[in-house]
Amino acid sequence: MPREKRYPINGCRRATSGDKRMPSRRTVMWALSLLALLGVGYAKVNPAFAARCEASYATYIRPAYAACESSLRPYVGTISRAFARPAAQPAVKSTCVTSTGQERRTPLPPVARSALSPGERIAKGHAYLKHRHEFGFSSREQMASHVDRVISFSGSADTRQLRGGRVAYWDNASRSVVIVDPNTVDGGTTFKPSRGRAYFVSLK
């Protein structure tokens, strides 16, 4: 009577020396690398073998690569949009009109303030309501352009570092001063001082 085979409780049979095992991934990679190196070395000493390899590449591999590329091309834009950065949100307006028709300022959130240029931030503050008539500005964009121009083209003689991290700029063409103050909601101001450049020089 043949002897009954017994297995462990978990139902798994123990591996024996006669079992066939699949090669590991590392073994397969090493074997493929070795075959590639041998093929390259053999192609160096056998031009006919190299020519057959080039013909096989041109006949099979290159058309397959071109077919894959053409089939995936319509999805390239979708994949790029999926991993693209989200578009910047438009800056929130800092003014609103009350029931009496007067314009009231509202503070900009920190993200919106950081997205504005110094001129845009100043023009959205009190400087436009208080000093626009000194320049003859009819829009906030005109004041913002003026402030950014003064900041960009002021030389060292027309720039002063003030206390509290403020920076003052003098514009001789318009006889106006621009003060950038990162500590305030408006970001600074611009106006035409009655004392002219003497006022700019006296700033601390």
Image (cartoon, rainbow, N blue to C red):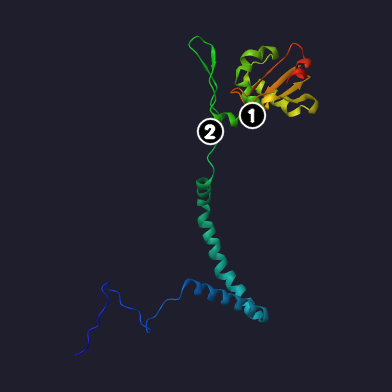
Q: How many other residues sit within 10 Å of disc 1, few (<14), some (14-19) or many (≥20)? A: some
Residue identified by numbered label 1? 117
Please provide percent x and percent y for residue 58: 59, 69
Disc ID at residue 89: 2
* Amino acid on which the number 2 mark rests in the picture: Gln
Residue, x 54% and y 42% (percent of image)?
85
Q: Nearer the viewer, residue 49 or 96?
A: 96
Front tag of 1 and 2: 1
Q: Which element type, helix, strand or loop, lies under badge 2?
A: loop
The residue closer to the viewer here, 53 or 147, is 147
Q: Residue at x 25, y 73 (%)?
A: 9
Residue type pointed to by label 1: Ser
Q: Kindly indicate the quadrant of the structure image that contains residue 122.
A: top right
Examine the rendered structure and indicate whether residue 185 appears above or below residue 72: above
Give the percent coordinates (x, y) of residue 8. Answer: 27, 76
The answer to which of 35 and 76 lies nearer the viewer is 35
7 to 83, vertically: above or below: below
Residue 99 drawn at (x, y percent) = 48, 11
Task: Determine the secondary structure under disc 1.
Answer: loop
Residue at image x 76%, y 21%?
171
